[in-house]
Structure formats: C-alpha cells, structure tokens
Amino acid sequence: MTETSDKAWVSSTHHPMSFRGFVATVAAIMALNPLALDLMLPGLPDLASAFRLADVNHAQAVLSVFLVGFGGGQFIMGPLSDRFGRRPILIGGLIVYVVASLLAIAAPTFETLLLARFLQGLGTSASRVIATSIVRDCYSGRRMASVMSLAMMIFISVPLIAPSLGQIVMLAGEWRGMFIVLMLYGVLTLVWTGLRLPETLPLSERKSLAAREVAGNVMQTLTNRQTFGYALAAGCVQGVLFGYVLSSQQIFTVIYDLGPYFPIAFGAVALGVAVAGFVNSQIVGRFGMRVISHSALAAQIAIALTMLAAAILHWLPLWLFMLLSTANMFAFGLIFSNFSALAMEPQGHIAGTASSLFGSITTLVGIGVGALIGQHFNGTLMPLAGGAFAAALVTLAIVLVVEKGRLFVPHNKPV
C-alpha cells in the first residue's frame, strides 16, 4: 500500500500508532542488534582475560557468533511471520533474547557464553525481520525508503553511545554488567511492543507454511534480479561495517593508543551513519533510491582507495583515519537504506519471507567479509583498508549486473 497519512498505514482492525510513534518503535526494535554488538567492544580485553583466551582476536567470537545467530535465524522468521503475523514472532524473539541474556550473565565458561550470544542473535533476528516487514506492510517506494532512513537515524544513536555505556559498565564492574544492561533493554522493548505495536499483517494476507508455498515464495525472492542482487550488494557493503566494528577496539587502542577514549572516537565515526539517515530521508523523494545509492557507492570506492593508499604509504594519522572513516559511514548509510528499499520493493506480497532472506543474505555475507577483515588484524590498517576497497569493487560489479550496466537511473524510470 502507498498511503502516507498517519492513520492509513495500519490495519483498520487495530488502533493505529502515530507516524512518529511508528518510526520510533521500528527504531527501538532495530536497535536491539547494534546495542548487543557495540556494547561489547570495550569489554573484549576483559573477556579475554576472564576466560584466559589467547588474545583479543579470539574474544571477537562473542561478536561473530552473535552475528551468525542473527543471520541464520532470519531464514525462518519471515515465513513464520507471514503465517502467524508480525506481533507473535517479534514477541517470541524478544523472549528468547531476554532468556539468552540471563544465560550470558550466569555463564561459567566461554563456550556457554558463546551459546548465549548465539541465542541472543537468534532472538534479534526476529526483531530485524519484523522491523523491515512492518515498514513494507505499511509503505512502498520512496516513502518506504524515507521511513527506513528516519528509523536508521534514530537507531544509529545506539552505536554512538553503546561503547561509552559499555566503558562505564566496565569501570563500575565486570563484563557481566554488560549483559545486565542488554537484558533490561530487552525487557523494556518487550513490554513496549507488547502494549503498543499493532499487528500490521491482516488475516486475509497470511501465507501458508505448506512446503510447496514456502519454497515457491523463497524461489520467487531468490530469482528476482533486483531483490537478490541488492541483497548480495548490501551484504558486501555491510561486511566493511562489520570488519570495522570487529577491529575498532584494537585499531583505536593498539594503533592510536586512545585507551579509555576509544568509545568517543567510535561514536564520532558512527555519527556519519546517523547524518546519512537524516539526509536520505530528506532527499530520497526527490532523487530516488538508485541515484543516491549509486552515487554513494562511487564515493565509497574513492574513500576506500584513499585509505588504502594512505595505509600503504604509512601515513594515516588519527585525524585522517577519523575523517575517512566518518565519510565511509556516511556513504554506508546512504547505500544500505536504499539498497534495502530497492531489494524489498518488488516483494510487498511476501514481505516477511523476502525480509528474512534479505536479512540472512546480507548478514551472513557481511559477517563472512567482516570476520575475514577482523581476524586478519595485524597491528596495521592494511586489512581494513584493503578489505573495504575490495568489497566496494565487488559491490559495484554486482550492481552493474543487477542494473544491466545502467547506473544512476531514477527509481521511477524503467531499467
């Protein structure tokens, strides 16, 4: 549906939320994932010490295992939400998230902690799928891209404050305190969505879980050039973000020796995504998703090449790294929100399944690229810079195939 008024987007059988309330709720749901990821960054050295791990690279497993659960879980959340509705799947995922947080708090071994992190990721996979699905249930086209941008602008404030909050928790106690914070946020989100979020999928549009129909919906999604292609492209772009997140604690504390000031630098870089979300919400209606995302991709390639050249020349002072990283995050914000909207645009009738597959593809491709970058950290910026440049080139190649060689074509024109 394409209605844009505050009251038109929700099923008439439920009390509608205001537009601002809807965007804020979507952002709060989406924030579960970055909070569970970025809050952990200051605690990686403490985790490595507490569980007697070989080095901080091994402690990165609490991030990568979480992302594996997050990516893999999305395969099943979409079909389930298409069959049973958005609310029950979201609430079930939030319950799993809260229980997993309790398990993490009590974890006696690193293996138990990794299990808890996998379950946390599984729980947040429901929040990711449902957030994307309810937006697609209610909006389409450039309006959908605008809503996603506004939600991203709000939820990206989490990476701005999460490392600082994690640092405060670590100063006040130990690593278990981080999971207490995650549990409390999960409980608050569960209560809020349970009380306020309406069901956006009418009974008349529910899908069957019959194997043939599910398989048909999956094939319909995977064989759509625009959906599958932009999912792969978004995954490559997200891989650079994951690589930066996985390496950031070591980059800022080992290379630049920022110590406790690391969260400030991390938050300053993340500000680029927040600004991009606001800018995109204001201009996407005028220029369209393709023009903006393709232009941002070209800029990202130039930024990655500049960082790689500076790393090779061993001239990448903190101010230049911060400038290039912030610019890269700004480009990422423009790319990812529009790639997401482009991928979902043809799939309004099977938004849950399509959202599942899109989320799984982007996350699993992203964690593959990100883990490759993070695990190759060697005390220099070469792994991050080289990985970012390679991923950007692969993204460009995928987009060229999807668009049949035609870039910067407005969304409302045939391609």
Image (cartoon, rainbow, N blue to C red):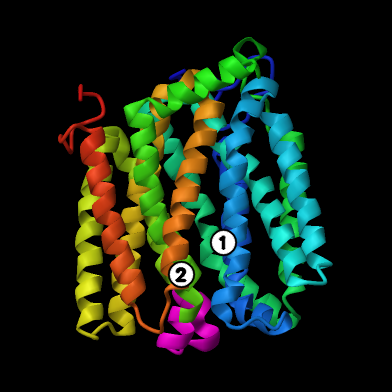
Q: What's the amino acid at mark 1?
A: Ser
Q: Is residue 91 above or below residue 310?
A: above
Count up the numbered dots: 2
At mark 1, the secondary structure is: helix
Q: Main secondary structure of the magenta part?
A: helix
- Assess disc 1: are there few (<14), some (14-19) or many (≥20) residues with their C-alpha within 10 Å of its C-alpha: many
Q: Which residues are magenta?
A: 251-267
- Residue at 41% x, 56% y: name it: 239
- Front-most of residues 183 and 79: 79
Give the label on residue 64, or none: 1
- Front-most of residues 302 and 200: 302
Q: Is residue 311 visible?
A: yes
Horizontal placement of 356 versus 170: left or right? left
Whether 260 is among the magenta residues is yes
Q: Is residue 383 above or below residue 79?
A: below
Q: Quadrant of residue 342?
A: top left
Q: Earlier in the sequence, mark 1 or mark 2?
A: 1
At mark 2, the secondary structure is: helix
Give the label on residue 115, or none: none
Q: Quadrant of residue 325?
A: bottom left
- Residue ID for mark 2: 374
Horizontal placement of 49 versus 249: left or right? right
Indicate the position of residue 176 as horizontal and vertical percent values.
76, 72
Indicate the position of residue 205 as horizontal and vertical percent values.
60, 13
Q: Is residue 4 visible?
A: no
Whether 374 is among the magenta residues is no
Q: What's the amino acid at mark 2?
A: Gly
